[in-house]
């Protein structure tokens, strides 16, 4: 049996725990500059439409009484380590999705045993951190995730083996993994509005709407999800981004930011024992057009200077010509384990 755990409104809940005067009030965690976005909102803020990734100025327009508190990443990481240690004490395998969210494989056990273990973990997290955590228990990862979302906040929902299809059937088609907003709109125009509608498609219909993904998506809609909980998921890339409070035109300023980002990703590579074979730069202009440039290295590296040199090469190739930039990011990919070799650039 598999469980999905997600701490309720994590960042906001930490702020409320540490300042009880915030309890029962609309709270958002966000930075302080003009282009900050909401990282997390308390449940009292959500009826106003305040959600994660909403620009802060829009959140304040929607909820004038919104209380905004700054993020404290070091505190979140400490709490996350504590919570994951609790997971580890009960799990056969853990697949971390973020600081506050994970899949756990309980191994071969009954629904009742898995549900009891999930409740024990919820109690231990509350005792250790003062935070509530919601959980879904099921035979597959997607069903467990949907179940935990359905019982938030501070809930536990178990889906019995054999009941998966009935549980999923009335839910919006967009709840299927891989069906994004554009695909959902297209499917709804074709009359496919629920997961049950997808489950009922025949082979030809499924292929018409989903192409080569048809069999997989229809199996998920029928509650068949055999993907394992992957404790050692491979790191595909490491990145760092910054959104500027005011648009930046000077290439010198962009280079300064890339220097800091190169140092950050190099540190992460060192920590994970990896080296990168490619470096890329992401640029979002003031008009929201996004440009990306990437270069491949002659040999893997985790050296911040070589990463910066490659990033600056990508920046020059972007040929901005003084165009205003609202965001710049640096990404290393094609990661390989081990120490890099001492070689020349490119």
Image: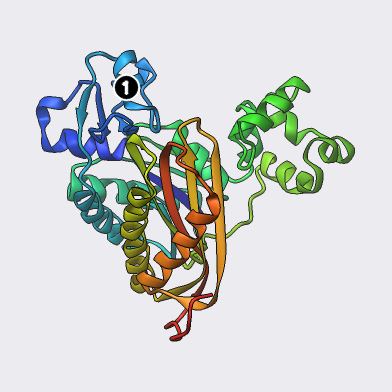
Identity of the residue furthest to the bottom in this view: 342
Q: Is residue 73 above or below residue 148?
A: below
Spot occupied by residue 110 in the image (x, y as percentages of width and height):
50, 54
Is 240 displayed left or right of 68 in the figure? right
Within-10-Å neighbours for mark 1: few <14, some 14–19, many 20+: some
- Between 299 and 139, the residue placed more toward the observer is 299
Q: Is residue 274 above or below residue 84?
A: below
Spot occupied by residue 219 in the image (x, y as percentages of width and height):
72, 45
Is residue 106 visible to the viewer in this orientation of the structure?
no
- Colour approach in the figure: rainbow
Spot occupied by residue 233 in the image (x, y as percentages of width and height):
50, 64
- Between 151 and 9, the residue placed more toward the observer is 9
- Between 283 and 194, the residue placed more toward the observer is 283
Is residue 334 visible to the viewer in this orientation of the structure?
yes
**Residue under the point 22% across and 33% down:** 32
| Residue matched to label 1 | 57
Residue 66 occupies which quadrant of the picture?
Answer: top left
Q: Secondary structure at mark 1?
A: helix
**Residue under the point 67% across and 25% down:** 185
Is 246 displayed left or right of 149 in the figure? left
Identity of the residue furthest to the front in this view: 321
């Amino acid at each position: 049996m598999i469980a999905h755990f997600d701490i309720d409104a994590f960042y906001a809940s930490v702020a409320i725990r540490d300042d009880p005067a915030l309890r029962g009030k609309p709270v958002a965690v966000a930075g302080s500059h003009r282009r900050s976005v909401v990282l997390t909102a308390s449940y009292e803020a959500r009826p106003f439409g305040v959600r994660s990734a909403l620009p802060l100025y829009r959140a304040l327009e929607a909820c004038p009484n919104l209380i905004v508190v700054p993020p404290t990443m070091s505190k979140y990481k400490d709490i996350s380590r504590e919570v994951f240690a609790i997971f580890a004490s009960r799990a056969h395998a853990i697949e971390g999705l973020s600081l506050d969210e994970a899949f756990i494989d309980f191994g071969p056990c009954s629904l009742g045993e898995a549900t009891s273990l999930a409740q024990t973990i919820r109690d231990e997290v509350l005792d250790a951190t003062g935070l509530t955590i919601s959980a879904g228990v099921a035979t597959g990862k997607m069903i467990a995730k949907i179940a935990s979302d359905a019982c938030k906040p501070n809930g536990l929902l178990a889906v019995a083996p054999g009941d998966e299809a009935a549980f999923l059937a009335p839910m919006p088609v967009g709840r299927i993994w891989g069906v994004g907003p554009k695909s959902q709109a297209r499917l709804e125009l074709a009359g496919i509005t629920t997961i049950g509608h997808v489950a009922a498609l025949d082979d030809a219909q499924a292929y018409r709407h989903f192409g080569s993904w048809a069999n997989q998506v229809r199996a998920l809609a029928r509650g068949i999800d055999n993907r394992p909980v992957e404790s050692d998921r491979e790191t595909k890339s490491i990145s760092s981004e910054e959104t500027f409070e005011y648009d930046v035109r000077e290439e010198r300023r962009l280079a300064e930011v890339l220097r800091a980002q190169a140092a950050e990703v190099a540190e992460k590579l060192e920590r994970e024992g990896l080296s990168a074979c490619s470096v890329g730069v992401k640029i979002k202009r003031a008009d929201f057009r996004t440009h990306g440039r990437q270069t491949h290295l002659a040999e893997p590296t985790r050296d911040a200077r070589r990463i910066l040199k490659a990033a600056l090469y990508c920046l020059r190739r972007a040929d901005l010509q003084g165009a205003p930039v609202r965001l710049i990011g640096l990404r290393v990919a094609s990661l390989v384990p081990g120490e890099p070799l001492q070689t020349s650039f490119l």
